[in-house]
């Protein structure tokens, strides 16, 4: 028999859902922490729940960001590019330092898993200005359909 191993680290369900900050999000957004950096790990992940038309502000991540849509229909857009419609099962990667936003489509809920790395200070990225209602409406009307 091998050596005795320490128990697996388990964080039991019951971690509080956080409301998305009004500085970083428009509309009602809720975040469930999934992975929090511990020790040498830089991995951060959250399950983000968007109500219809809720969205992030423009933002960027030093090491890039992957989002994986688990439910609903959403919109994603990088600065200067077309908005795109995304659905459950779609995986989106934003390049390091690429300014972008993402959120729910009009009239639809959307949930995605957001994965990114934090820097030495524990920061996952930088937030910019909010996506205006006019910007959002234009993006939704012109979104490339999935």
Image (cartoon, rainbow, N blue to C red):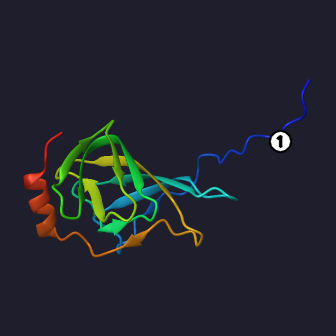
| Disc 1: which residue | 6
Report whether 7 appears left or right of 138.
right
Report whether 18 appears left or right of 138.
right
| Residue drawn at (74%, 40%) of the image | 8
Across and down, in percent, residue 140 comes to 13, 55
Across and down, in percent, residue 46 comes to 47, 53
Report whether 13 appears left or right of 135.
right
| Residue drawn at (53%, 63%) of the image | 118
Mark 1 lies on a secondary structure that is loop
Across and down, in percent, residue 110 comes to 30, 47
Across and down, in percent, residue 39 comes to 70, 59
| Residue drawn at (44%, 57%) of the image | 31
Quadrant in which the C terminus is drawn = top left
| Residue drawn at (32%, 62%) of the image | 28
Of residues 103 and 97, the one drawn nearer to the viewer in this rendering: 97
Quadrant in which the N terminus is drawn = top right
Seen from this angle, which residue lies furthest top? 1
Q: Quadrant of residue 4?
A: top right
């Amino acid at each position: 028999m091998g050596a005795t191993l320490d128990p697996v680290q388990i964080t039991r369900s019951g971690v509080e859902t956080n409301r998305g900050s009004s500085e970083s999000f428009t509309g009602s957004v809720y975040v469930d922490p999934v992975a929090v950096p511990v020790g040498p790990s830089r991995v951060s992940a959250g399950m983000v729940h968007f109500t219809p038309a809720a969205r992030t502000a423009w933002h960027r991540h030093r090491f890039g960001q992957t989002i994986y849509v688990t439910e609903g229909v959403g919109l994603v857009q990088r600065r200067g590019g077309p908005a795109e419609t995304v659905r459950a099962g779609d995986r989106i990667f934003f390049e390091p330092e690429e300014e972008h936003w993402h959120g729910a489509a009009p009239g639809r809920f959307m949930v995605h898993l957001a994965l990114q790395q934090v820097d030495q200070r524990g920061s996952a990225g930088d937030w910019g200005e909010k996506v205006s209602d006019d910007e959002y409406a234009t993006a939704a009307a012109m979104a490339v359909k999935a």
